[in-house]
Image (cartoon, grey):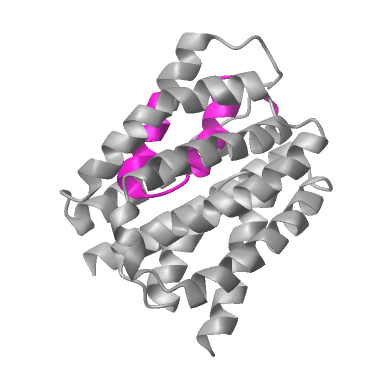
Amino acid sequence: MSVLILALVAGSAVGLALGGLGGGGSVLAVPALIYLLGFTPVAATTASLIIVTVTSISSLVAHARDGNVRWRSGLLFAAAGIGPAMLGGLAAGHIPAAVLTVAFSVIAALAAWRMLGPGRPVQDRPVRPHRAAGSGAGLGAVTGVLGVGGGFLAVPALVGVLGLRMKAAVGTSLLVIVINSLAALATRTGTADALDWAVIAPFTAAAVLGAWDGKRLAAKISGNRLQHVFAYVLLAVAAFMLLDSII
């Protein structure tokens, strides 16, 4: 299968995740770029942030139009993560790749476990700034260190910590992803020269189109089912990355 076709298929999957689940784009993009398209881990994480940023902006517009973005919550959450995301991006270069992979797998698995746990009634409630700031700072650090947009952690946090409904959490997480990814990219400008834009461009285009399909799919699926789909995707990716790091 040609590189172009692989890039289009992988990009579509990333877009579906971002548009329908509000996250999971990077946790799918990074393995695809490394294992299917031959990117180095450093190049893959930088390329992933670019792809996810562009795709998230496109999907954010659609979710905002439907009223599924809680701007105040999202901005509070993301603002707290800007500094940690930049510091994490600087620290990432000094951490062994195997350690990063294991940490990535564990965090993804924990997020999935939380999403699959006993359900609680979830409804929008007043946002507590200190909780938003604390969660946002932690997410920003993870984004910077692991080179991911953070949506796979933002959605559980927005649901469990801030009490947003699933559809609102999906839309709001896209705002958080954009801001955190841009902050992380600011520390990775030196790695952009080695990127293969002939692969990144079609990958991104397919992801943008896939995000619109994902958004339409989300409108037809209940919030609980979205959470479960999201959790199983995280578990599968976590298991794959962990096995690859120890074999």
Q: Is residue 87 magenta?
A: no
Residue 50 placement (x, y as % from top left): 48, 55
Q: Is residue 180 left or right of residue 64?
A: left
Q: Is residue 140 magenta?
A: yes
Residue found 66% across the figure and 38% down from its top = 170
Residue 163 visible in the picture: no
Q: Is residue 80 left or right of residue 216?
A: left
Residue 211 placement (x, y as % from top left): 69, 56
Residue 92 visible in the picture: yes
- Give, as a single range, the part of the protein colored magenta: 137-165
Q: Main secondary structure of the magenta part?
A: helix
Residue found 67% across the figure and 58% down from its top = 16
Q: Nearer the viewer, residue 39 or 183?
A: 183
Q: Quadrant of the C terminus?
A: bottom left
Q: Quadrant of the N terminus?
A: bottom right
Residue 222 placement (x, y as % from top left): 78, 41
